[in-house]
Image (spheres, helix red, strand yellow):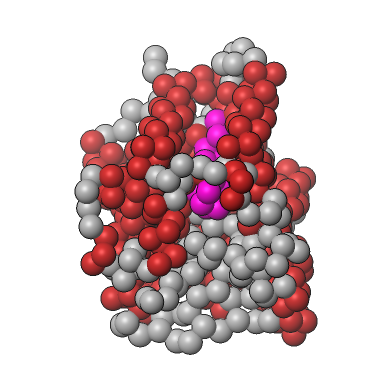
Amino acid sequence: MKTRRLTGFAALAFLSGLLILDRWVSEPLNPYQAPPIVAYGSGLASGGAHCAAMPSAN
Amino acid sequence: MTEAVAVARHMPPLLPRATLIGAALLMVGLLAVTAGARYGLLLAVGLGLGMTLEGLRFGFAGPSRAMILRRDPAGLLAQLIAIGLVATVAIPLLASRSEEMIGAHAPVGFAMVGGAFVFGAAMQVVLGCGSGTLVNAGAGNPVALVALPFFAIGSFAGAYHLFWWTDLGTLPEIVLTGVPGLVITLAGLVAVGSVLLWLAAPGTRRIPRRLWLAALLVAGLAIANLLVAGQPWGVVYGLGLWTAKAATAAGADLSGSLFWSAPANVERVSESLLTDVTSVTNIGLIGGAFLIAAWRGGLEQGLPKLPARAWIATVVTGLLLGYSSRLAFGCNVGAFFSGISTGSLHGWAWFAAGFAGSVAGVKLRPWLGLEGGR
């Protein structure tokens, strides 16, 4: 009988494929340009990439 | 409890538990080293959320269904408690740290309310909202696994057309801020909780210990998300971004969309998903749910046999979940949970419209052949 083992690993494969695609098309990661570990107290504005955020068109 | 779960509990776990914990810690450490400590921490938050939602069966679609079908308010009450806890921290925090933190603030409008209604109906069809689809997919639920890519495609398309929809009629953003905002928010949560208790069936007015614990953990992790990322917990932005990445890789030109051509989104599409807050926590949700399912033998459950119309409904519903959640400025997490807990009026409008949609969705689910398919 087929079990959720198949679909659970398929979900991980989906993520792996996504990250491989990401690695291929995105700018390389650079930990030296990473923001401070915690936004609280950093003084830097949030990136604003959130479901509720309406981007300005300019 | 189903027979399949009972059988699964007597089977050995798929992977040794130490291996599962080690793999999760390794992923967090690797991301911290390669992308930055903030993203490693956010992956840990996402893993914690996935483990909590799957391990303690805390969700968003199921509690609405329980209230509609059995007048059992426990799950909804646990959600309200978690939202209240987050609001108690988040609303004052946003007032004092507005330069470095944002809330889930969005305007109420025709498309927003309609989107929440459609999302509420769709999440009852596949029994999974934004976080629920990710968690269920990670736990090996085949319906969620099929819905997930279409959810992502729908989210991309909904964002693509977002400005057209908001131009149909949208109020100014209304946000409850400071101490008065917190008092009004908490009073609103108490009022909704009181109505739920009044409507509850006899013997269902007690919140199980499992849900108390889940509410505390989810609230703690949502606050951690806000402190670390500078923005509240969200889900659907990341899913749309995944499709935007794939579309760009396939040569698509996104400049025709006001949303995807906005400078902030162009930057997100060009940079790695591993530096996008919602993508990282979404990955954590799937991973955390997989870990719990593998830990307790849940992956040994058999797959359901569903009719063809159920799979067609799953694909269409996945698209609708994604599209509608963008018009609604979020799903249960980004709009309802994070909207209310950061003082946005659209969170309350989302809850009312989403619950009304759930009533329709509960009736649709058996008709589409999905009953018993979780």
Position of A38 compared to B151: left or right? right
Position of B59 compared to A10: left or right? right
Image position of B57 with respect to B344: above or below: above
What is the span of residues highlighted in magenta in the rendered image? B275-290
Q: Nearer the viewer, residue B252 or B158?
A: B252
Image position of B374 with respect to B124: above or below: above
How far across and down, in percent of the image, does residue B257 sit? Answer: 28, 67
Residue B203 falls within the magenta-colored stretch: no
Image label count: 0
**Quarter occupied by residue B163:** bottom left
Residue visible at 55% across and 53% down in the picture? B277
Image position of B198 with respect to A26: above or below: below
Residue visible at 68% across and 60% down in the picture? A39
Residue visible at 45% across and 24% down in the picture? A9
How far across and down, in percent of the image, does residue B273 sit? Answer: 46, 46
State the quadrant of the C terminus of chain B. Answer: top left
